[in-house]
Amino acid sequence: MAEVNAVPDEPGQPPALTAPALAQTAEQPKVKEQIITPFDVSGGVDETGKAVAIDYDKLIETFGSKRIDKALLERFEKVTGHKPHRLMRRGMVFSHRDLDIILDKYEKGTPFFLYTGRGPSSDSMHVGHTIPFEFTKFLQDVFNVFLIIMLTDDEKFFHTPKLSLEDCHKFAIQNAMDIIAIGFDIKKTFIFIDTDFVDGGHGAAFNRNVRLLGKRTTINQIKGTFGFGDSNNIAEFAFPAMQSATAFATSFPFIFGPSPKTVAKIPCLIPCAIDQDPYFRQCRDNARQLGYIKPALIHSVFLPSLKGSETKMSASDADSSIFLADTDKQIQKKIGNAFSGGQDSRELHRQLGGRTEVDIPFQYLRFFLEDDAELEDIRVRYEKGELESGDMKMRCTREVQAYVSGFRERRKQVTEEVLRTFLRPRALEFQGSLVSVEGEREEEVRRLEKRLGELRAA
């Protein structure tokens, strides 16, 4: 058989349609790298044109973070006296920046605070949104620390052409009530909506940090970090300074006190999904220039879409997500239609077993089922073919329904008065001193050195 390049032109055929030309111009599958930014999340496409799952090991390498390994989990348990959260044990909270330093400070009695947030893009959050918040609640309970939650209605307005500022603010109010229903301590938690707080009387110190950060951030840095181009609006370029400002205790003197030198020493730990990391790489780069401590981060993976592990749940795609407002019937239907790792026939499934690594109902159980032993039993039985896909979906449905049902009951308790309290700038309640023991010792040494110098001079 002649090679493709040896096939002669057919008589009367235009040159552009010759066999060699057709072979050369045939469209080949285009390999696409995974995209993980605050605005776009996808796992990429391989050389066969197949969508692939998000590679979190590659993200650690690309972003330059560190994996949460067994040794760090053991240190967490030793320092806190608490078993690591199921998301940590199972590798869904998988990466960090300076978590080890936070543990060192906590062990020495140095206080810190937590900061997380959400960009409100719809009036109902989905269960994927609750993952970082549930984990944040665990951290607040374990460390007994203040928490600040930022709702970036302005950022969603800047980045989403179809949304009005009024829409985004309305979503922020509803999302705030959803977040409160996770169960945060009202005495130790402050929630703010950007368009309300930043322009209000309590936002002066916050705005000062925004300006300091903005002056030290270049257009080239933002382009390189976020992939922005000339078509992005100027508000998008400016916003990273605002999201970064929340990571510094000096932005909130009504919580941490009015002394900038003392308050600047209070570190911050940010639990977030890995797509938010670009914001805080910028923040960490600029912190030292301002005399602040670089915020630490702890990253979670995404709850995958119902359609498959190539992307995350999205509020803009109802078929990919389970919303906190969904009924039990809607949850059952959605999980019943979720992507399965089962085989094409019952006989083949019994022979080969199910593929838990791509089975969405099993992946959801990894997120929501607390019992490690039961989860392992389900995995083994499914991979052996003893548990069928329908059984897996039924077990997942019960677990997710219970999770959402519990949320619904808590959500009923979130009144307008409760909401106003969480949103009100105020002093939070803390037993002890926000100035660390270590910081007090340093201050005492400086006072003694100053006194010694005065005595020598006399």
Image (cartoon, rainbow, N blue to C red):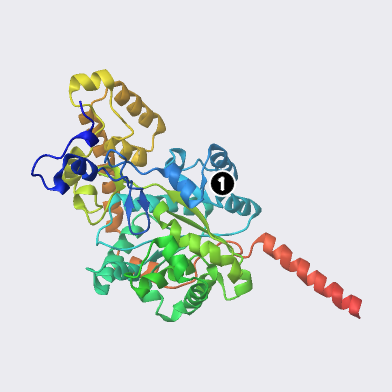
Quarter of the image for residue 40 reads bottom left
Residue 260, x across and y down, in percent: 60, 74
Q: Is residue 391 visible?
A: yes
Instruction: State the residue in front, 56 or 430.
Output: 56
Amino acid bearing label 1: Thr
Identity of the residue furthest to the left in this view? 12
**Residue 128 location, x and y as percent?**
32, 50
Q: Residue at x 47, y 52 (%)?
A: 63
Q: Quadrant of residue 182?
A: bottom left
SS category of the residue bearing label 1: helix
Q: Is residue 186 visible?
A: no
Dividing the image into 4 quarters, which one contains the N terminus? top left
Q: Work out whether 109 lies above or below 429.
A: above
Is 440 left, or right, of 278 in this rendering? right
Q: Residue at x 28, y 42 (%)?
A: 51
Horizontal side, residue 366 vs residue 280: left or right = left
| Marker count (numbered) | 1
Residue shown at 54% from the left, 37% from the top: 70
State which quadrant residue 416 falls in: bottom left
Q: Foreground: 68 or 106?
A: 68
Q: Which residue corresponds to the image point at 41% horizontal and 72% vertical from the top-left?
A: 238
- Crowd class of label 1 (few under 14; some 14 to 19; many from 20; radius 10 Å): some
Vertical arrangement, residue 251 with respect to residue 295, above or below: below
Quadrant placement of the C terminus: bottom right
Where does residue 415 sit, x and y in percent of width and height?
A: 30, 64
Identify the residue at the far front of this view.
11
Left or right, 395 with reference to 453: left
Q: Along the line of sight, which residue is nearer the eye, 297 or 4?
A: 4
Q: Which residue is mark 1?
A: 80
